[in-house]
Image (spheres, grey):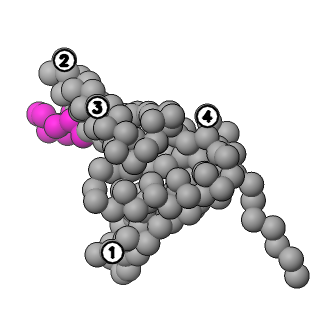
Amino acid sequence: MTTSIPNYQQIVIAVDFSESSKMVASRALDIAQKNGAAITLLHAVEYLSPLAFGDELIPSPDWLLVEKELVKQGEKSLRAFAEEMGLDDATTLVPSGSPSHEIITVAKEKNADLIVVGTHGRHGLQRLLGSTANSVINHAACDVLAVRLQH
C-alpha cells in the first residue's frame, strides 16, 4: 500500500512565544520549504475582561485599550519572532479571541491545508478541561501537526 504525503501549500503556525514555539516553527518551516508552501504565523490574544457588580458585564473603554495594547504588543513580538526564525516573508496575524477558535478561523480564511501547533500531551483532568491543540485537532477542516513539546 502506497500512501502519498500531501503537498502542503498554505501552512498556519500557531505560536505562544514560549521557548517551545521555536521548535514548532522549525518543524513547520521544514515542511514549508520541502513543499514551497506559504506560511502564516499566528498568535491569538485572549483577553478576559473583569466582571463587576454580580455577574453583569459592564463595558469599559479601559478594557478596550488594554486589549488593543495586548494586540499591539503581540504584533511587535510576532514580527520579532518571524525575523528570528528566518520567516521574514511569512504573513503575521494577531487576532483577539480564544486561541483555538482563532487558529481554526484563520486556517479557514487562508484556505490552509496544514496547521502546526505545539502540544504538551496532557492527560487526565487537564485533558478533560481541554487544550488549544486538542480543540484544533478536533475541529480543524485541514490536517493538523501537533508537535510534542517537552514538559
Instruction: Tell me the SS state at disc 4.
Output: helix
Closest to the camera, between mark 4 and mark 1, is: 1
Residue 49 highlighted magenta (yes or no)? yes
Instruction: Tell me the SS state at disc 2.
Output: helix
Residue 127 placement (x, y as % from top left): 39, 72
Does the magenta stretch mainly form a helix, a strand or a loop?
loop
Look at 43% across and 72% down and name the residue there: 148
Mark before the other along the chain sequence, 4 or 2: 2
**Range of residues picked out in magenta:** 48-56
Mark 4 residue type = Glu
| Label 4 with label 2: CB-CB less than 8 Å | no
Q: CA distance from mark 2 to mark 3?
A: 23 Å
Judging by the rendered image, the residue that carries numbered circle 4 is 109
- In the drawing, what numbered circle is on residue 76? 3
Mark 3 residue type = Lys
Look at 37% across and 75% down and name the residue there: 122
Closest to the camera, between mark 3 and mark 4, is: 3
Judging by the rendered image, the residue that carries numbered circle 1 is 150
Can residue 132 be seen in this snapshot? yes
Q: Quadrant of residue 88?
A: top left
Q: Residues within 10 Å of mark 1 (few under 14, many from 20)?
A: few
Q: CA distance from mark 4 to mark 2?
A: 29 Å
| Label 3 with label 1: CB-CB less than 8 Å | no
Mark before the other along the chain sequence, 1 or 2: 2
Nearest the eye: 52 or 114:
114
Q: Residues within 10 Å of mark 4 (few under 14, many from 20)?
A: few
Tell me: 77 left or right of 3: left
Tell me: 116 left or right of 60: right
Instruction: Tell me the SS state at disc 3.
Output: helix
Judging by the rendered image, the residue that carries numbered circle 2 is 61
